[in-house]
Amino acid sequence: MFITPAFAQTAGGQASGAGVLVQMAPLVLIFVVFYFLLIRPQQKKMKEHKGKIDAVQKGDQVVTGGGLVGKVARVDDIYVDIELAPGMKVKAVKSTLADVIDPTTAKPAND
């Protein structure tokens, strides 16, 4: 009703399928770039972290999400007992562990 005949006409000489393809190509390209530069590396990193946390065993040195560093005293399906100091143990949820420290690369504190 309010559309003038000039606006109602389609693009002259172009097939509508090719026009849509040309308009969608940049969006598809952006998605592909995001996938390979952001999404895929993050998924790989999360998979490695989950594998590292699932492989935690007694005697490993770990870092909690809060920054506490200690040695694993007991491992459960959900919880981990961490010995922060001799005779001082805390219970942490296994999924909140931030990292498992490799004992060969860990440096002792300057005590």
Image (cartoon, rainbow, N blue to C red):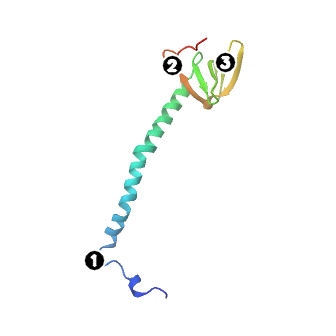
Say which amino acid is labelled 2: Asp
Picture quadrant of residue 98: top right
| Circles 1 and 3: CB atoms closer than 8 Å | no
Crowd class of label 3 (few under 14; some 14 to 19; many from 20; radius 10 Å): some
How far is the residue under mark 1 from the one under mark 3? 75 Å
The amino acid type of the residue labelled 1 equals Gly
Q: Tell me: residue 75, above or below residue 13.
A: above
Residue 6 percent coordinates (x, y): 38, 85
Decide which of tag 2 and tag 3 comes sooner along the chain. 3
Q: Residue 42, position in %: x, y?
A: 47, 39
Q: Which residue in the structure is indicated by mark 1?
A: 13
Q: Dot 2 surroundings within 10 Å: few (below 14), some, or many (20 or more)? A: few
Q: Do the residues labelled 2 and 1 touch (CB within 8 Å)?
A: no
Amino acid at circle 3: Leu
Q: Please determine whether, in this image, residue 27 is positioned above or below residue 2.
A: above
- Please tell me whether mark 2 sits on a helix, a strand or a loop: loop
Q: In which quarter of the image is the C terminus?
A: top right
Q: Name the residue under label 3.
A: 84
Give the numbered dot on residue 102.
2
- Gap in angstroms between the C-alphas marked 2 and 1: 66 Å
Residue at 42%, 47% in the rendered image: 35
Mark 1 residue element: loop
